[in-house]
Amino acid sequence: STHFIVTADKKETLFEIKEMLTAFLKGRGVTLSEEKILITHVSDGFDFLRFNVRKYKGTLLIKPSKKSQKRFTDKLHELVLTKGKALSQQELIGTLSLVICG
């Protein structure tokens, strides 16, 4: 699966680019998934590859998406409260360190 981010100064330009991109891909036997296309202003933000991207007061902010943050905290919760009960303190710290550092 291929991901695209297209930026433009006007919404109309984005729709023109979408049409050109659709024609380009169609010529190669590929189609765009209409339900996965999002045209939004960068100040409203959007999620892309587990990150939330938005512009706030002229500054571009890129941070983990809420869904990604929840997945991470759920993983820590499961590790500490479920699997962690059978681990020694040193083993638990070592395992948590691996998860937190990636």
Image: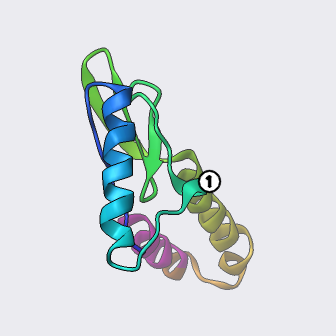
Residue under label 1, please give it: 70
For the point 38% across and 48% down, which residue is it? 18
Front-most of 97 and 16? 16
Q: Which residues are magenta?
A: 92-101
Front-most of 13 and 99? 13
Circle 1: residue type: Lys
Q: Is residue 58 visible?
A: yes
In the rendered image, residue 62, in percent from the top left (x then y), is placed at 33, 41
Q: Quadrant of the N terminus?
A: bottom left
* Residue 60: quadrant of the picture: top left
Q: Is residue 97 magenta?
A: yes
Q: Is residue 102 visible?
A: no
In the rendered image, residue 47, in percent from the top left (x then y), is placed at 47, 47
Instruction: Name above or below for residue 55 compared with residue 99.
Output: above
Front-most of 93 and 61? 61
* Residue 11: quadrant of the picture: top left
Q: Quadrant of the C terminus?
A: bottom left
In the rendered image, residue 57, in percent from the top left (x then y), is placed at 31, 14
Q: Quick check: 97 left or right of 33?
A: left
Instruction: Name above or below for residue 88 compared with residue 81.
Output: below
In the rendered image, residue 96, in percent from the top left (x then y), is placed at 49, 70
Label 1 crowd bin: few (<14), some (14–19), many (20+), radius 10 Å: few
Q: Is residue 19 magenta?
A: no
For the point 41% across and 70% down, which residue is it? 97
Which element type, helix, strand or loop, lies under badge 1? helix
Front-most of 49 and 38? 38
SS assignment for the magenta stretch, majority:
helix
Q: Quick check: 5 left or right of 36?
A: left
For the point 69% across and 70% down, which residue is it? 78
> In the image as oriented, which residue stretches furthest toward the top?
57
